[in-house]
Amino acid sequence: MTLRMSMGDRPLRPHRTAPEESGARSTREPCPPPEGRRPGRRFRLHTADLSASATVFLIALPLSLGIALATGAPLQAGLVAAAVGGIVVGLLGGAPLQVSGPAAGLTVVTADLIQQYGWRTTCALTVVAGLAQFGLGCARVARSALAVSPAIVHGMLAGIGVTIALAQLHVVLGGTPQSSAVANALALPDQLTDLHVGALSVSALTVATLLVWPRLPHRWGRMLRRAPAALVAVALATAFTTLAGLRMPRVDLPSWRSHALPGMPDGPVLGLLAAALTITLVASVESLLSAVAVDKLATARGGPPESRVPRADLDRELRGQGAANVVSGALGGLPVTGVAVRSSANVAAGAVSRASTVLHGVWVLLAAGVLVGALELIPLAVLAALVMVVGVQMVSLTHVRTVRRHREVLVYAATLTAVVLLGVLEGVAAGIAVAVGLALHRLAHTRITVEKEPDGTHRVRVRGQLMFLAVPRLSRALGQVPEGAPAVVELDGSFLDHAAYETLQHWRDAHTGLGGTVTVTGRAGDRIGEPHASHSCRPWTPWRNHQCTRPPTPRKPGAASGQLVSGLSAFQRNTAPLVRDELARLAKEGQRPSQLFLTCADSRLVTSMITSSGPGDLFTVRNVGNLVPLPGLETSDDSVAAAIEYAVEVLEVSSITVCGHSGCGAMQALLSSGPEGPRTPLKRWLRHGFPSLDRMNAGHPEDGPRIAGRPPADTVERLCLTNVVQQLRNLAAHESVARRMAEGSLELHGMYFDVGEAQAYVLDGEAKEFARVEPAAQEESLV
């Protein structure tokens, strides 16, 4: 939760983000969209969504028919799935710009199920898979699906693409596909000797249009490319077939009165469960990966704040996909997944909310009722050619290069081959087995060598992960270093287990005890590690306190400076090597923080710790009581105003945070201050807190800000919370801040940190409450 503050005395309005967006370090994240474009908010229609929905509809219509044809299902099933995917997932899903519908990734699975169990049972299995997806979404395990290696996912999709292409090639040539990819490959020579000229000609026209249309040159080409290539290819091939008078099978949409609905599953229980599991697995993984990809596309698109959307809530998206599969299966439709092609087109067309996805489903629904005559003119060979090209494109060279760069070609090849020869579920299992075996091989494969350099130094090089299996070889290598000789141990790996560490440490202690020297480095030569007996504050480890858990010692003259020098020395030894490159970049490029963080000078408030920020993230201003003097007062402190002006006008920060804290000494002094006594600098400064004190005294205690649903514990805490609200008002009175807020390019945030609880709270101005910030689950990234 963040806070957007309006001008004047209008109420503070909360600005909420998706659950995955929560977390302290958010200075580099894009701003969430206006209220109407957030998940769960009321449905609003925008011009950009209307045009984007039309574009996606024109792509989805022919593809839905083609995928239904490729599976052997009734052609209407593709339209049902497209309409349900658009409307149901659009309304309930967690990825606003993702477009769902029948996907090529499930073509092979669905075709096998129809052939083995029949269409009505396949519909029932789709319902069961949808219920399983919904349950997984409720169990909040969506991100676990992203733990599957990308090489397995890419290999699975490539294998499905090969299977689709082989099957549809027979239709393109005028024949009938066989029951498996192997059978289709074996039957291809005979099919080539018995070509159907009409089917081949319209298929060739379709493929040529699909390949040429996105590459049309010049200005008129850019104008024509606004029409989707799939729609243009199908329209041209259909028009050619009609004008040439070619006779060939065409789309046949039976009456909706005879549309087949699901029936009771008929078959072996284990086989039916395996089929439902396969649909659940493939549909879930494909949908979640597509949602992550859409997030990246939407972020890369940039644009004004009103065009930005929140990041996907993957658990909610999985629940939406499950609900859509239940509805689609119940209505006699194909299984539904998130579709990357339509989703990317939706983003490229400028969609800004889920309205475009919902509307695309509405257009498909209308087309299924009023465009039946036009759809029945389309030759089946044209749809087969369209789906064949989609299948070929699923074998992505970009994915192959990525997998090769990460040395996972074996996993990719094993998954692809097993999917083509055995099936999707078997292929994924084979890919997982190979991936695990490869990981174990890399973990256990360690190469250790010993070299003597010209200066007499013995260099022990360790390549790979150093674990207990390599301890005997490590001991033999270390034993080759003569007593008293200088030695360098070079570790090139990311893992060192306890057994290897103890072996290395014991040898190091013994070798140095005999007069030798030991330096442990990484491959680049940087020193790593220290004797575990030497106690020091390590960077990037759980923070304890500035005493480093040492027992307190009596203060002596010069102890403070000694502690400072000791800390600086520890920084140069441990932290400086880790941050030197980043600081060098910042020194060259200059600072570009996205947030001004104004907080108290209290020593217990460590801003970098509680915000998980690093160099260059925050422009920080600290003073006693986190006060913002009102502009124009004779007693104003120009240092704070200057910092605000510099941050807003020069650095162009996008947000300002005022952070108060518990047990604030300034607030305690403010409560006990009075007109009598000398006018010390501290008392003159605290006069800027009088408006906060007046604000607290003017209102009833029940009307003041609350913290996590409860009233403040005491008067000091009440004043600390009230002070944050008042300083936000003072900030808005500064001219530069007011102007940027009016433009919509600057937001104000209120925050409170309870020192004793180590708990952060953020202000929801609409509810007049500081809400607890919950720990965010660690996010995985898809390589």
Image (cartoon, helix red, strand yellow):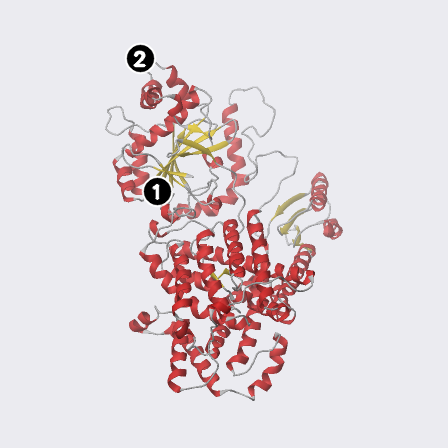
Residue marked by disc 1 = 653
Nearer to the camera, 51 or 615: 51
Give, as a three-letter code, the residue at label 1.
Answer: Val
Q: Earlier in the sequence, mark 1 or mark 2?
A: 1
Nearer to the camera, 94 or 219: 94
Q: Establish if 30 lies above or below 163.
A: above
Mark drawn on residue 675: 2
Q: Establish if 94 lies above or below 563.
A: below
Asked if residue 228 lies left or right of residue 397, the reply is left
Circles 1 and 2: CB distance less than 8 Å?
Answer: no
Taking the view exactly as shown, the residue that stands out farthest to the bottom is: 193
Nearer to the camera, 756 or 19: 19
The image quadrant of residue 717 is: top left
* Residue drawn at (54%, 64%) of the image: 261
- Give the CA separation, mark 1 to mark 2: 39 Å
Kindly tell me whether residue 624 is visible in this rendering: no
Q: Residues within 10 Å of mark 1 (few under 14, many from 20)?
A: many
Give, as a three-letter code, the residue at label 2.
Answer: Pro
Asked if residue 556 lies left or right of residue 186, the reply is left
Q: Establish if 447 lies above or below 731.
A: below
Q: Secondary structure beneath disc 2?
A: loop
Q: Could you tell me residue 12's position as x and y percent?
A: 34, 35
Taking the view exactly as shown, the residue that stands out farthest to the top is: 676
Q: Secondary structure beneath disc 1?
A: loop
Kindly tell me whether residue 294 is visible in this rendering: yes
* Residue drawn at (38%, 43%) of the image: 594
Nearer to the camera, 262 or 25: 262
